[in-house]
């Protein structure tokens, strides 16, 4: 999986705000393409969520609608951009205001301004306006540096198309020159007439460095900028704080939590904790959502400072001495950053959590999803018990794309564990949420009871684990001694089987109990064994690398069950045997505001991009935004306003077929309704005794959110009709709803 990671990053990086500096295959002539050359094409990877199969979609530059084609199939533009962070970023009023103020302070005379990762061209337009560039026929010609020039560099073709549309809407198309390429492909004398005097750019993620800030700045300083240039932003400072938090402990401490479960299943046997866990890295997280569960164990402290106006180093280490302000157990390090956008130090922006009062970052902190805080989970944190006023030694380092920590109490000084800087230290690397779920006693109890019930109904079963659930594989092998178990592991592959062989003895099953079968060979093997039918077909469902999926995109196991229908015994048990699509109306002001349609942003009209970016509020009649996956409990202020009826039922005991359903959603609370939240409750057994809910009150699963075009105030407890249709050919679910009655 890791061998494919860099290619995957190259594919998804354009979906993130800011620049795109990771190399992707391009021919030498393409790298030197002039602005007058014929329309270009790019490839977009399209994945079928129900099969895992992918195809390449061709996007034409001249296709102003943003569509794509693969011969006969078409990809709507909304599928390319509506799931990105662009809309959320452009709705961040604090960010927009800060950049405008800093650019006005910095761009005070005609010069050459370079915008890397230009997006819709907002920063480029700010720079052009600050220079007082006028629209004229002569501006389409090549400018000299003394006349003033703004160059907007953007690699992602769909975004380039939107930028051109925005520039036309604001009559700025002749004031800004667009380069459709990565910044490290730009050459002075070929693409731009001279080195730039000022760099304006926003290629920052929640960790600060994850979008390639350092290599982008290095190349820009080496090849594209004058000596001692001005930059917006001017500087960034990373801060951190030590915390104790039970929820954060759950997300990485599977060893101790598994011991508390008392079910005899050992995903992490004693002395084998290195074979499964989370990757040692920083994770973006809305820490304000758990503010009441956090105990602060130190004051905020500065970790690193990055000056954008000079060439950064690829790697640095630092040693800090931190005094504990409370007694407790250090479970995590929470970090954030503070931007100084202008050289005078008058404009700031902070991603600090709400409990940090940043006097330098003035303005209301509107909720946004494109920048969060970052969480670093401390290995073996239960041993890091500190008392008030104890001095701790913290060592930190940064690479080109990440910041990493090692914390040891001063009483136990050790060498800095450089192995934490490796890309992967565990044989099976789980997400923090999956790690937390696998240690959850209540969830494990439901799963084990459902497995025992299924095994009780079958004799000498041939069992197929259709997804990537290592828990199901271990639990079934542990609970049945006469079982034959086949496992597909479509994401984990042979790696999962190697892991399961390592934990076999601790779970009382033989190393060869579980046989890995890839999807291509499965049908051949089953055909060769006509007398043997599958009588137990199971899934969590869980697919490795599918953490950002909509709930129904985990129905891949149902598609597999359908394809294997002829190989199932007549009395085959399917687990889960059904799914209940639930829906409720919710108050979601922060999320709605972050996704609402754009109008003017610091004086520049952006209304022409709302349809492509999937906005809500102000769309034409009949249009609506997409359904998007969110951890609803992390979406700022929220409130459930209605009951949660079943919208439609999936029957996994039968082959996959179109499903539809409708229901009345009854309002139980007054308030502003911003949209509907959907999720699936998994019915594990035919009797309905074991049901796993994944609703908005659960922290381990994302829900689907369908925002209303315009919020509705609910004064009385009325109802609204909601209808859903699931199309198995595409794996998509459509939702229709009547506007809630006020």
Image: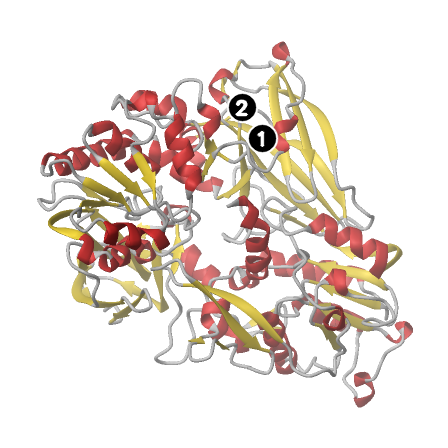
Q: Residue at x 26, y 21 (%)?
A: 262
Residue 709 pos. (x, y %): 37, 70
Relative side of 386 to 342, left or right: left
Relative side of 85 to 549, left or right: right
Say whether marks 1 and 2 touch (CB < 8 Å). yes
Question: Which structural element holds mark 1?
Answer: strand
Quickly name the residue at label 2: 297
Above or below residue 286? Residue 382 is above
Quickly name the residue at label 1: 241
Q: Indicate the quadrant where residue 273 lies.
A: top left
Front residue of 672/191: it is 191
Above or below residue 53? Residue 360 is above
Q: CA distance from mark 1 to mark 2?
A: 8 Å
Mark yes or no: residue 503 visible: yes
Relative side of 683 to 551, left or right: left
Question: Which structural element holds mark 2?
Answer: loop
């Amino acid at each position: 999986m890791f061998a494919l990671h860099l290619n995957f990053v190259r594919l998804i990086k354009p979906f993130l705000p800011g620049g795109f500096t990771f190399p992707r295959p391009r021919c030498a002539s393409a790298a030197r393409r002039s602005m007058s050359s014929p329309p270009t094409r790019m490839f977009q990877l399209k994945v079928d969520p129900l099969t895992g199969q992918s195809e390449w979609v061709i996007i034409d530059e001249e296709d102003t609608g943003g569509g794509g084609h693969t011969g006969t199939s078409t990809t709507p533009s909304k599928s390319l951009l509506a799931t990105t962070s662009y809309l959320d970023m452009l709705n961040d009023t604090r960010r927009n205001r800060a950049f405008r103020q800093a650019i006005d302070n910095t761009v005070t005379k005609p010069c050459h301004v370079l915008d890397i990762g230009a997006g819709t061209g907002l920063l480029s337009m700010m720079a052009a306006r600050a220079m007082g560039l006028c629209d004229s026929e002569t501006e389409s010609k090549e400018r000299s540096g003394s006349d003033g020039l703004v160059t907007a560099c953007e690699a992602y073709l769909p975004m380039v198309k939107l930028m051109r549309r925005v520039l036309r809407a604001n009559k700025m198309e002749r004031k800004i020159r667009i380069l459709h390429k990565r910044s490290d492909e730009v050459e002075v004398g070929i693409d731009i007439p001279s080195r730039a005097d000022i760099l304006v750019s926003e290629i920052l993620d929640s960790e600060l460095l994850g979008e390639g800030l350092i290599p982008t700045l290095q190349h820009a300083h080496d090849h594209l900028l004058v000596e001692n240039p001005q930059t917006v932003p001017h500087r960034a400072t990373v801060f951190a704080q030590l915390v104790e938090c039970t929820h954060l402990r759950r997300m990485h401490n599977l060893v101790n939590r598994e011991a508390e479960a008392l079910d005899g299943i050992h995903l992490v046997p004693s002395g084998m904790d290195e074979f499964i866990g989370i990757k040692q890295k920083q994770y973006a997280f809305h820490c304000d959502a758990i503010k009441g569960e956090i105990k602060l164990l130190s004051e905020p402290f500065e970790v690193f400072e990055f000056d954008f106006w000079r060439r950064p180093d690829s790697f640095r280490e630092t040693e800090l001495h931190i005094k504990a302000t409370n007694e407790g157990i250090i479970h995590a390090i929470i970090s954030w950053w503070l931007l100084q956008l202008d050289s005078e130090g008058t404009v700031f922006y902070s991603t600090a959590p709400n409990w940090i009062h940043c006097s330098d970052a003035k303005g209301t902190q509107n909720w946004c999803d494109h920048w969060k805080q970052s969480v670093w989970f401390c290995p073996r944190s239960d041993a890091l018990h500190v008392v008030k006023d104890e001095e701790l030694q913290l060592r930190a380092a940064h690479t080109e794309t990440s910041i990493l920590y090692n914390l040891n109490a001063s009483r136990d000084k050790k060498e800095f564990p450089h192995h934490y800087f490796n890309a992967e230290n565990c044989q099976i690397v789980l997400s923090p949420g999956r790690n937390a779920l696998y240690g959850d006693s209540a969830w494990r109890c439901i799963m084990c009871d459902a497995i025992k019930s299924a095994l009780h109904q079958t004799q000498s079963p041939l069992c197929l684990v259709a997804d990537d659930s290592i828990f199901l594989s271990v639990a079934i092998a542990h609970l049945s001694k006469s079982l034959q178990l086949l496992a597909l592991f479509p994401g984990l592959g042979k790696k999962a089987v190697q892991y399961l062989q390592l934990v076999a003895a601790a779970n009382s099953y033989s190393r060869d109990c579980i046989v890995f079968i890839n999807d291509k060979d499965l049908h051949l093997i089953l055909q060769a064994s006509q007398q043997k039918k599958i009588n137990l077909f199971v899934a969590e469902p869980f697919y490795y690398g599918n953490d950002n999926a909509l709930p129904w995109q985990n129905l891949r196991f149902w598609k597999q069950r359908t394809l294997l229908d002829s190989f199932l015994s007549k009395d085959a048990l399917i687990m889960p045997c059904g799914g209940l699509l639930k829906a409720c109306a919710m108050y979601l002001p922060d999320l709605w505001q972050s996704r609402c349609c754009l109008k003017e942003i610091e004086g520049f009209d952006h209304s022409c991009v709302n349809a492509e970016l999937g906005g809500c509020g102000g769309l034409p009649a009949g249009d609506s935004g997409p359904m998007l996956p969110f951890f609803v409990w992390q979406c700022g202020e929220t409130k459930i306003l209605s009951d949660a009826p079943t919208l439609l039922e999936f029957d996994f005991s039968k082959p996959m077929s179109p499903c539809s359903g409708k229901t009345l959603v009854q309002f139980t609370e007054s308030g502003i309704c911003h949209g509907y939240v959907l999720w699936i409750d998994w019915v594990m057994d035919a009797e309905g005794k074991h049901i796993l809910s994944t609703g908005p009150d659960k922290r381990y699963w994302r829900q689907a959110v369908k925002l209303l075009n315009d919020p509705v105030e609910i004064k009385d407890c009325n109802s609204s009709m909601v209808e859903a249709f699931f199309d198995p050919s595409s794996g998509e679910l459509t939702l229709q709803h009547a506007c809630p009655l006020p």
